[in-house]
Image: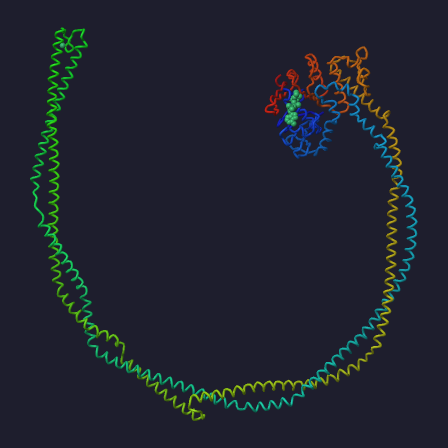
Amino acid sequence: MIEIRKVKLENFLSHERSEVTFSPGINVIIGHNGAGKSSIIDAIYFSLFREPVRKISLEELIRKGAKDASVELLVEVDNRSYLISRNIKGGIVDTLSELVPNKYSKTIARGAKEVNEHVYKLLGANEDVFSSTLFIGQGKIEEVFDNLSEIMEKILKLERMNKLRETNGPIHSLIKEIEGELKVIEEKKKRQKELEHGIEESKKKVEEEEKALHEKTKEKEEIEIRIKEKKEEINSIEDKRNKLISLTNQKSRYENETSNIREKLKERPLLEKKRDDLQNYIKDEEPLNEKLKAISETLTLLDQINQSDKLIQKLREELSKKKSDLEEKKKLEEKERRYRELDMRKNELEEKEKQYISKTAELRRDKIALEEKERKLKEFKDIDTSELEDKIKKIKEELEEKRRQIEGINSRKGEIEGEIKQLLNIKQNLQTFNKSNKCPVCGRDLSEHDRTRIDIEIEQKVKELSAKKLELNKEYQNINVLIRQLEQLLDRTEKELKEALRHKAQLDALKSDIQHLQDEISDLEKEVSELTPLHEEFKKVSDELKILVDYHNRYLKVSSVSEEEVARLEDELQKEVVERDRRQENLKKILKDKGLPTDKKELIALGEEIENKLKEIKKKKDELSNIQSKLAILESEESRLLNLENELKEIERQIKELNFREEDYALAKQELDELQREYTNLTTEIGRLSGEITILKTNIEKNNQELNEIKKELEKEEKLINAKKKLEKLRDVLNEKNLQAFLKNNAKSSIENNLVSILSKFDLSYRALELNFDKAGSKGKNKVSSIIVFNDKGEEVSVNALSGGERTSIALALRLAIARSLMKGAGILILDEPTVNLDEYRKRELIDIIRSSLEIVNQIILVTHDEELMEAGDYVLKLEKRGGISKVEVVSNNQQAL
Ligand SMILES: Nc1ncnc2c1ncn2[C@@H]1O[C@H](COP(=O)(O)OP(=O)(O)OP(=O)(O)O)[C@@H](O)[C@H]1O
Ligand SMILES: [Zn+2]
C-alpha cells in the first residue's frame, strides 16, 4: 500500500519553491482558480511516471522564467520510506532512494528508466492502470463507463497480443528465422561428410612421409661423422702449411735485411777518411782558447786601471776642499761662541720684553682715555635738585586742598536735590489726595486756601533750591579747571626733576671713571719703570746678534767637517794609488808573456779573429761527432749481419724438415666439399618432409575443429524444430477466441467480485452488476452499456437510468474495483475538482462516497476550489498565487482541531 508523505516542487509550473506534506485520510487542497492546486498533483504524477498529466511537453512543466525544474516525492510503502527525485533539464539524473530513519539513504535506482521500473514495483501498477483508475482528472469520474472496453484492452494489453500474431508480427518472423536456420543445418551436414573423408586421406599421407623422414635423418647423422673426420685431417695439413708460409716470409725478410746492410757497409772507408781529417783540424782549439782568455783578462785590467785613475782624481779634489773648510771652521769658532751666549740671553729676556711692549701700549691708551674724560668733565654744569623737590611738594598740597573743596560741593548738591525731590513729592500728594482734604504729611484737615498756599510755598522753595544748585555747579566747574592746571604743572615739574637726577648720575659715573683711570696709570708707570733696564739690555743684545748672524751662518756651513774625516780621506786615497800601481805591474807582465799588442784596439781585433776561428772549429766538431755516430751504427750493423746469416741457415733446415705438399691439401679439400654438398641436400629434404607433415597435421586439426562445431550446431536442430512447433502453437493460442477471451473473463469476474464488495460499503441497494468488456456499439441509441445493474427485484436497470449520485458512486467503485484487481494494494486516490457542475445535494452525496472510499484506500488527495469541501478534509492545504507565483498559504489539521 503506497502512501504519499511529502512533495517538493522547484520551478514546477506556477510554483517556485513549495513543499507540501500529506497525511493519511482525506487531504483537501483548496484555492482559487489558477492558484496552483492542480500543479501539486501534477507534480505527484510527474514524480511517479515522469510524464505530464496535461497535454503539454516536459519543457512546458518548467516554470516560466526558470531554466530547469525539479520535483521530490517522499512515499511510504509497507513501512519503508522512499524518495523519488526527478529533474527536467538541470542535468541531474533522476534517482530513487530508500531512506532509513536517522541512518542513511541508499540509492536504489538511477536514471529515468530505472526509476520508472522501480516505481512500478512500489506502486504495483503502471501509468496506464493508475491513470485509468485511481488518478481522476477534472469531472472525469464517470468516463469509466464509456471507455471501459478500451481501458480493459489497454490494461490487459490485448492490443499487443493481436500485434504479435500478425503476418508481419514477431511470431511469424521468428518462425521464418528458424526455418532459415534449419536450411543452414542441412548444408552443414553435407560439409561434415566431406571433412571426414579428407581427414582420412591426410592421415595416410602423414604416415608415409614420417617413414621417409626417419631414413633421411639416419643418413644425415653418418655424413656428419665423416665431415668431422675430414675437417680434422685438413686442419693438420693447414697447420703445416701455415708454418711453411710463416717460415718463407721470415726467410725473405731476413734476406732483404742482409742485402740492405751490405749496401750500407760500402760507405764506411769514405767516412773513416773524413773523420781523420776533422780530428786533425780541431787540434788548434786549446791554445786558441788560452790566448782568448788572456786577451779578455788584459782588457779587464785596462778598464780597472782607468776607473782607479778617475777615483784618485775625485778623492784628491774632495780632500783639498775639506781641508780648507776645516781651516775656516777654526777661524770662526770664537765668534760662534759669542753668538750662542747672546742668543741664549735674548731668549731669556724675550718674555719681559713682551710684557714691556704690552704695558707701554696699555699706558698710552689709558692716558688718551683720561684726557678725553677730563675734557668731558669740564663741559658738565652743576644742577641743584632740592629747589625742584620743594616746588613739587607745594603743588601737591594745593591739589589736596582743591579736591577737598570739590567733595564739599558734591555733598551739598546731594542735600539740595533730596530736598527738591521731597517737596515735589508733597506737591504730588496734595493733588492725589485732593478729596480727603487731609495733609499728606501730618494728616491734618486742609482747606482749599491752605492747599494753594502750600503749593505756592513749595513752588517758591523749589525755585530757591534750584538757583542754589546752579551756583554750586558753577563753582564746581571753576575749581575743576584749577585742579587740571595744577595736575599739568605737577607733571611737568616731576619730569624736570627726573631729568636733573639722570644728569647728576652721569656726572658721578664720569668722575669715578677718571679716578679709576688715574689709579691704573700710576700702577702701569711703576711697572714700566721696573721693566725699562731689561728692555734696554734686550735692545743691545739684539743689535749685536744682528752683526754676528753672518758669521754664524758661515760657521753652520762648515761645522760638519772634522779632523777624522780628513784623515780617513787621505787614507782612502793612499790605498787606491797602491791598488792602481799593482794592476799596472800585472798588465805589463801579461803583455810580455803572451806577446800581445799593447794597443787596446789591436787587442780587441785580435780577440774577434780568434773567436771566429773557434766558431769554425765548433762546427767541425759537430760534423765529426755526426760521422762518429754513423760509424758506430755501421759497426753494430756488421754484427747483425753475422747473426742474420746464421738464422737463414736454420730456417732452411726447418723448411726441409716440414715436407709439405700442396697436392695433398687440395685433394682433402675437394673430398670435404663433396661431403658437405651431400649434407646440405639431406637437410633440405628433411626440412621439406617435416614441413609437409606439419601442414598436413594442422589441416587435420582445423578440419576436426570445424567438424566439432558442425556437430554442435547439429545438436540445435532438434531444439529448433521444437521451437518452431511451439511458436506455431502460440500463434494459434493468441487467437482472439482463445487467450484473450480467457483473460477478459478472468479480469471480469475478479473486478465484478470486488465491485460488489466495494458497493456494499457505499451503502447502495443493488444486488448485482455485470460488466461488459466488448466494444460498445456505435454511439447513439444502439449503444451497448458497459455495465448492467440489477435492482432488488432482479430487474435490469440501465446506468443512464440511475441517479447522478448513484452513477458517480458506481463509477468510483468500478475504478477502485479495477485497481484492486490489478494492483497489489491500492493505496491512494487522487481527485481533481470532482464536484464541478454538481448541485448542492449531489455534492453532499459525493463527499459521503469519497469518505466511504477510505475503506478501500488509505489516503485521498482532493483538489477543489469549493470552500465547502474543506470540511470533508482531515487535512487542509490552502494555495494562493502572489506575484505570479503559487504559495502554500495555510495548512490546517481538522483532526487536531476536533
Ligand atoms: N510553466 C508555467 N510556469 C508558470 N505558470 C504556469 C506554467 N504553466 C501553467 N502555469 C500557470 O499556473 C497557474 C496554476 O495552474 P493550476 O492548474 O495548478 O491551477 P489550479 O489552482 O488548479 O486552478 P484551476 O482551479 O483553475 O484548475 C495557471 O495560472 C497557469 O496559467
Ligand atoms: Zn500736614
Relative placement, left or right, of 748 versus 587 is right
Relative placement, left or right, of 510 versus 19 is left
x and y percentages locating residue 430 in the rendered image: 16, 10
Residue at horizontal 75 percent and vertical 79 percent from the top: 249
Image quadrant where one finds the N terminus:
top right
Image quadrant where one finds the C terminus:
top right
Report the coloring of the rendering.
Answer: rainbow
> On the image, which quarter does residue 726 sit in?
top right
Q: In the figure, 389 relative to 217: above or below? A: above
Relative placement, left or right, of 87 versus 454 is right
Whether residue 277 is visible here, answered yes or no, is yes
The quarter of the rendering in which ligand 1 is drawn is top right
> On the image, which quarter does residue 803 sit in?
top right
Q: In the figure, 570 relative to 374: above or below? A: below
> On the image, which quarter does residue 277 sit in?
bottom right
Q: How many marks?
A: 0
Residue at horizontal 12 percent and vertical 38 percent from the top: 494
Relative placement, left or right, of 288 versus 176 is left
x and y percentages locating residue 177 in the rendered image: 86, 37
Whether residue 22 is visible here, answered yes or no, is no
x and y percentages locating residue 652 in the rendered image: 77, 83
x and y percentages locating residue 493 in the rendered image: 11, 38
The one nearer the camera, 695 or 757, is 695
Q: In the figure, 550 relative to 75: above or below? A: below
